[in-house]
Each structure stands twice: as structure tokens, then as C-alpha cells.
Image (spheres, coloured by chain):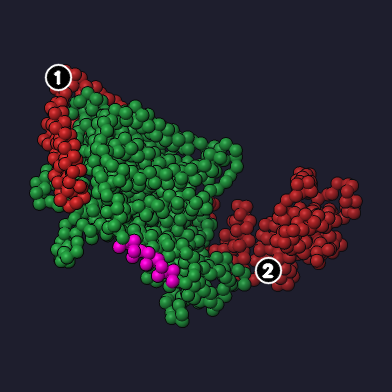
Chain colours: A red, B green
Amino acid sequence: MVIWIILLAMTAAAVMVVLWPLSRHAAARGQADPDIQFYREQIAEIERDQERGALLPGEAEAAKAEAGRRLLRATGTQDEGFAALGEPALRRRRAVSALALSVVPILAIALYGAYGSPHIFDRPAMMASRPQAAAPDLDVAVTQIETHLAQNPQDGRGWEVLAPVYLRMGRVDDAVKAYGNALRILGENADRLSNYGEAMVLAGNGLISSEAQAAFEKAVALDKAAPKARFYLAKAAEQDGRTDKAKAAYEELLAVSPADAPWTPLVKEQLARLGAPQAAPAQGGEPQMGPEDILRMVSGLAERLESQGGSAEEWARLMRSYAVLGQRDKAEAAARRARQALAKDDAGLKTIETMARELKLTDAAQ
Amino acid sequence: MLVEAGHFALALALGLSLIQFVVPLWGARSNDPVLMAVAPAAALAVLACLGFAFLSLTVAYVTSDFSVLNVVENSHSTKPMIYKISGVWGNHEGSMLLWVLILALFGAVVALARNSVPARLQANTLAVQGLVTVAFLLFILTTSNPFTRVVPMPAEGQDLNPLLQDLGLAIHPPLLYIGYVGFSICFAFACAALIDGRIDAVWARIVRPWTLGAWVFLTLGIAMGSYWAYYELGWGGWWFWDPVENASLMPWLAGTALVHSTVVMEKRDALKVWTILLAILTFSLSLLGTFLVRSGVLTSVHSFAVDPERGVFILGILVLFIGGSLTLFAWRAPLLKQGGLFAPVSREGALVLNNLFLATACATVFIGTLYPLALEVVTGDKISVGAPFFNFTFLPLVVPLLLLVPLGQTLAWKRGNFLGTAQRLYAVLGISLIATLALVAFRNGGPVAAPLGIGLGIYLILGSFNEIVTRSWSRGTPLASAWRKASGLPRSTWGTVLAHAGVGVTVIGIAATAWDAEGLGTLKIGDTMRAGAYEARLERVVPRQAANYREDVATLRISRGGRELGTVETMKRLYVTRGMPTTEAGIMTVGLSQVYVSIGEILPDGSIGMRIYHKPLVLLIWLGAVVMAAGGTLSLTDRRLRIGAPSRARAMQAASVPAE
């Protein structure tokens, strides 16, 4: 309510400003006609210019005559007079008053009504009205921790708290950095290393890079039982195409875990998958891994790269996709095609070789 | 509450400026002084409303009120206070609000200058101004509202673009806008004169201080922007012929022409039609600049087409004002009486030539800036017109213009004597040539452009001061009396001399860039690299943490010929909130020259890519602009141009000095 009173007062003041000059009688402006004065000054100026040599004598005379003529003309037009009195003037004044009284408030209120938000208070008022105990939502909390960490980047606990939140929010790359910071500051332990590795796997779209694998191996070295690290190491073996080793690793993990461990179903699922007839011909039967649309995406990418070519990053993505899908021969074929396509692109070739080494493809040695 | 009151004040200002447009126009037509008297009252009220609106937005920024969308998008609670304030105009919406605020400020000054401006001219001028205000307020309220609120309120803002978190850019836009908007007053005066059908020397006298004032601010604004680009973008360049820069250069060129043509009009009552046209064109170019920068058409014609609301609105404003004023011009200009006559060889003739050159140069920049846009619209091809185009077209126009400057300054009004004038410049020409040759011999090799350009600069400076000398001293005059005479010359004469000398100073600075030396390399701690005679040694690289960014600071020790000069720091910053990196160049000033160090990539092995430049006399580029602006200001303080003091000026006339 208060706001409307203030807005009303503002409107009234604005209208008054316009009405005020209308209420006054035409005060004759006590100023000399600026024209006449100007030309007098100009004639004096021409004389001075002449003395100084900025005007040649003959020209000065002509210029003076010119200015004199204008002075005469200005004197002649002086008594034009103002039309401030009489009935028409009164009517004009009324019309303008009506205009001011209507246009200013209507326009202002219409526009403010369309775009304003009179019900929202400014921030300090909002703070006061909001209960202090209310739980801050996730975004706010993250922002607060980020601000805190920007100022105290050596706070390892902070990074460790933030990292899983990042993961949940889908900010995977940030999570990797946060775990990395926590590791650097707080030192290594099996949990931290496993989580760090897992974040890297997620960042790599499921592919276990050599860095991630190194992290998992370190974790197992620190704690033989570390289930997450062991699981991913088994998975890594699977991705390298060493199915037997993967199977053995999964079985070992099951053996050391309590029967009701939360990861048991997941591990069993992996084993069941590996146990099924696996060596289907690459061109033929349906590969078992991954939903159909992933396959479609991959084959779409392959077709496009084959027909139109593409960047080194795209070729590398194709190789990695095949590797993740377990189709190593296709991955190798893709690497060969990429090398041909990018023969002239040194940086691109480097990307391909790095990826080939990463995926442990057989002919990566070149 | 304050935010909403500010928002409402903005809406009120729209209503008031509509009154400011309609009522005075009616008053002037029906010759009714009461109606005309509404104009100044409304103009002052508009200023009060807009001032309040601006203030309330500023308060929202200062208190980090994140319930305002504009504050969320451009501020952060940890940002230093000065950038919280400059953040108000560091974004589209706020800068448009500043634009109209300055517009209203100028309107209020016109409203208060009742003694020096005839009532009818004042009423008509304020009416035109009112219309401009209406258009821009509608634009702000409907498409670029800075007072939009957000519910629920975010906890933290998104921070201001880090490139803009800089002192240079805190003051650059206000300067530039004062320049742009100042020309809107000239435009309003021109339209008012056309509406009234009366244009004469008196008009020119009234408009001249506005033109000069706007020109001074625009000059400073452009120089500031150029210096900012130099130290912030990390390339060491000072002018990029970027469309945004060209957008401010075009009104400057037209405005410079206007400053000169109003002199002719005031002194000789000539060039009226041309001056009016220039006043219209100058403001049109300012509007065009606003359109180019604000509509997003520069980043991509397509992004403009995707979100056309703002762009189309500004385009509408552009069409309304440029089209409307040119129509008015075509209709009324033939009615204007021709003014004083002059011979081709005369001060007037020289100024006409100056106008021709400046207008052509402006047209060149116009084509270079808009042709790529037009081409993209028509064919979809994206081309960029860069420095080579402008070097081939703009420079050949400017160099002869500069050669003519001292000549025109020395010529007499109405009919001059070319040979006599040239004779007076023999000494100046001689000294400049000797200086050029001496430089060529001294630098022995190297680019020939530098000594030639510096010679041109010296010629400009000496040629300007030559005017003072020839006017106050002749062979045999004792120095004391010559000095008396020189200091008795009108301030506008001194202003002219200073401004032209400033051009010379800038020319020297630009010419000396041909001597720039550059070094590029990868440094480890303790390594050195050199540029010209200067050597830089990488001392250390350390991280540092500030409130809203963290940075890696590289410290380099600069020495010359084994003599240590001190250290500079160059930083690679990461602004946390936007995740945006910036590079801060390290600059050491040695006299008028600078050593400029800029950090590049930090490689995994700890070595650092680094650029180092030695830029001789580079400061002169901007100092020249400051001198130009000082000249304009000096001219502005000339008794003849002081606003509101005609009677006093008259009383002092007997004792007064010649006016120029």
C-alpha cells in the first residue's frame, strides 16, 4: 500500500511541474533581443579583426555593411509581439492542462502496470521477511562453497565436500578438478583415489583412461578391499578386450565382498553379461552392449566421417566409442582410416595416436 | 521499494517528455509564451525523474540487490565497489539509461540558458529533444528494462564481464555518451531552426559551445577507449579499425567538420545549409553508432535476425530521426537565405576544403564499416574490412588535410593572399624538413614513414604556434611587448592553436609506431628476451588471489644496456564466476615511450610464452588527444561563447580583446 502512495505522490508532483508555468501570466522576458545585440558585437569584432590584419581593409568595409544590413533587418522584426492574451490563449491553456492531467498519469501507470512489479520488495526487506532457518537450496549452497573456496583454495575438506555435489549436478569436469584438489591437499587414501578415478571415468563417458586406471591401482595398493577401485579395474580389463581377466576380477570382488553388499547385484550382472556367448562375428549379430540408439549414433558418426571427413577429435571420439562398445577391430579400423584422412594434419595425427595409445590398440606403436 | 519507485520514475519521465515534445511546439506555432514556458519546466522535471531512476538503479548495484535481474547479470557481491558502480553502465540496459540521463541533463542546461537563447528557438529545440527522449524511453521500457525483477532471488550475481572491470572502461562510456548526446543538442537546434525557418549567425553562435563541448568529450572518450584497448586486450595495438571503434570515429569526423563550419557560419553567415546538414548527419551517425553497438548486428547479422526486437526498435528510431530530419531539411532548406560571399582563397575557402576532406574521410569509414554488413545481409558472405582498406583510403585523405591546416589557419577571412600566407610558413616548413632529414640521418635506416610522419607532426605544431608569433611579433618588436600582445589574443585563437598542435602531437605518436620493436619467446625463470634496446628478465611467477579472481603474476625486470629500470608485472587472470580468463599487460613508462610486456600461455613445464614490445613515443598518441580537448575547452571559455552572460559581455566590450 505504501508504495502506491509514494507513486501517487510522484505523479502529482510531475503533473504540478507542468501546470505551474501555465498558471503564471506571461511574464515579459526582460531580455534584449539577442539578434540586435549579436550584430552590434559582430560589427565591433570586424573592426578589431581589421586592426589586427585578419581582414583586409576593403573586405572589412564590405563585411561591416553586410552585418549592418542584418542589424537593420533584426530591428525591423522586433515588435512581432506575443499572443499571450485573449480567449484563444485561455483555451490553449485549458487544453494543455487537460493534456498534462491525463497523459502523464495514464501513460506512467499504464507502462508501469505492464512492466513493473510493485509487490516485490527490495532485497533487505526480503531478507527480513524470509525465515532464517529455511534450508538454502543446492545452487545457493554450491555458490557459497565456491565463493569460500575461491578465497581459501587450500581448504581440502571443502573440495571433498563439493566434489560429489558437482557429480550429482552433472558438472563432471568440475568434480574431477575438485577431487584432484582434495587429493593434492589432503593426501591420498583409497576412497579419495577411487572417487577421483570414478569421476574421470564419468568425464570420459565411461571409458577408463590410463590416468583413471592408475588411480584405481593406487587405491587397491593402499587398501586391498577397495570395492569401487576393484570394480573399475575389472571393467578396465574388459574394455581392453581381456575378458578372462575381467571375469576373474569380478569373481574375486564378489568373493571378498559380504553377500549383502550394495554392489553385489551390479557385479553379478557384469558376470552374467560376460558369461553369455560373446564371440559373435563383428559384422553379424547384435552386439550386446548398450542400447540401440547409442549404436545408431556411433554408426551415424562413422558414416558421416567416412563420407564427409571430419576433425581429429571426431575420429578420436569414434575410436573411443567402438572401444567402449567392445568392438576393438572396428576401433582399429577407424584408427587406420583416421590416419589416412588426416595424413596432412600433424596435430590431428597426434590426437589420433594419443587416443590409440590410450585405448591400447594393437598398431598404435607408430 | 526504491527500485520500484525508480522504475515508476522512468515511466513518469516518458509522460513528461511527451508533454515536452507536444506543448512547446504548439506554443511556438501559435506564438504563445505561456505554452513555450512549459518546455523548460518539463525538461527539468524529466531530468529529476531520470536522475532518480538512475540513482535507484545505482543503489541496487551498490547494495547487491539480486532481486533486480540487471544486477544479477552484471554484478557480484565480492566485486570491488568502483566496479559495482561502473557496472550500472557496463551493460546494455544501464548504458541506455545513462544515455537518456545525459540527454535530459543537456535538455535541462538548455532550459536554464534562457538569457542566451531566444524563447522560440528554445521551445522548438526542447520539443525536438523531448521527442528523442520519448523514443529512447519507450525503447528502454519495452525492450531493455533495467528494473526487471527476479523471483526467487538468486543468492549471487553472475559478475560483470571481466574485460569491463577496469578503470578505463568505468569512465570511457560516460565520456563517449556525453559526446554523442551533446551532438543531439546540435541536432535539436538544427531541427528547431528548420521548423522555425530562421537560421543565421545568431543560431551559429548559440550552437557553437554545444558543438565544441560535445566534440571535446567525444575526443576524450575515443582516446580513452583506444588506450583501454591498448593495455587491456594485450596486443599492444591502439586502434583496430573495429566497427565499434569506427562507430565512434564517424561522429567525431562529422563533428570536427561541424565545429569548423559553425565558425564560418557565425563569422560570415555563410555555409548555413551545409552546417545544418552536418548537424543532422553528426547526430545521425551517433545514432547509427548506438545502433551498431547495441543491436548485436555486429557480432552476426544472423543473431540480429534471431532476436530482432531491440535491433528493429533502434532501427525504427534511426529511420524516424534520420528520415524525419532529412525530410524536414529537404522541405525547409531551400527557404534559407544565402549568407556572406567569399573568394575561393580565403579562410572560409580553407574551411570548406577542410569540411570536404573530413566528410569524405567520414564516408570512407562509413563504407568500410557498413559494406561488410550489407554484403552479409545480401549474400550471406562474411568478410572483414581491416586496416589495409583504411590505410589505403583514409590516410591519403587525411595527410593532405593535415598539410593544409597551418595554411588555412593563417589565411585572412573573405579574401586571402595565398602567396603571402605561404611565405609566412616558410620558416615552419624549413624547420620541419630539417628535422625530418636529421631523423633520417640519425636513425640511419629503418622505416622511412616514421621520420616523414614526425616531420608532418612538427610542421603542424610549429604551424599552429606560428599564428601566434606572426600576430604578436614582427622584426624589432621587444619580446616583452610581443608576449603581452600574444597573451592578449582571444582564448579561442589560443584554443585553435592548441587543438591543431594536439593533432600534430598525435601524428608524431602514430608515426613513431613504425619504430616499434617486438620480441616473442618462451621464457623460464631467469631467462631474458629483448625488444630493441630493452631487455626483460623473468624473475618469478606466483599465483595470487583477489576477491573475485585469481591470477598468475609474472614479474619481469627491465633493463636497458645493462642499466636496470625496474620491474613490471603481467598477469593471467581467471575470473571465477564467469570462468573467463583475461590478460593484464605490464607496462613501464620511460619518458614518453613504453615497454609493454604481455604474458601468453603457461606451458606444463613451467615456461611461459611472453611478448615484449618497445613502443617509442607511444604516449603522444593519447596526449595529443588530451591537448586537442584542452584546446577545445580553452576555446569554450572564450568570453564570446559563455552562456547566459550577454549583458555583462557587452559592458566589458570596451576593454575586451578581439574575438576570433
Identify residue for label 1: A86
Q: Residue at x 15, y 28 (%)?
A: A77
In the picture, the quarter occupied by the N terminus of chain B is top left
Chain letter for mark 2, please. Answer: A
Q: Which SS type dominates the magenta stretch?
A: helix
Q: In terms of sequence position, does the residue under pointer 1 or pointer 2 come before the other?
A: 1
What's the CA distance linking mark 1 and mark 2?
99 Å
What residue lies at 74% left-to-right and 58% top-to-bottom? A344
Question: Label 2 amino acid?
Answer: Ala
Taking the magenta stretch, the answer to whether it contains residue B344 is no
Whole-percent x, y for residue A204 in the image: 70, 57
Instruction: Give how far across and how far down residue B318 sits, in percent.
Output: 42, 35
Look at the picture and state if B420 lies above or below A249. above
Q: Nearer the viewer, residue A366 or A301?
A: A366
Q: Residues within 10 Å of mark 2 (few under 14, many from 20)?
A: many
Magenta residues? Answer: B427-441
Q: Quadrant of residue A33?
A: top left
Comparing B361 with A224, the one in front is: B361
Q: In front: A328, or B598?
A: B598
Residue under numbered circle 2: A190
Q: Residues within 10 Å of mark 1 (few under 14, many from 20)?
A: few
Left or right of B250 in this view: A140: right
Q: Which residue is at the far top?
A: A87
Q: Residue at x 11, y 45 (%)?
A: B650
Q: Tag 1: residue type?
A: Gly
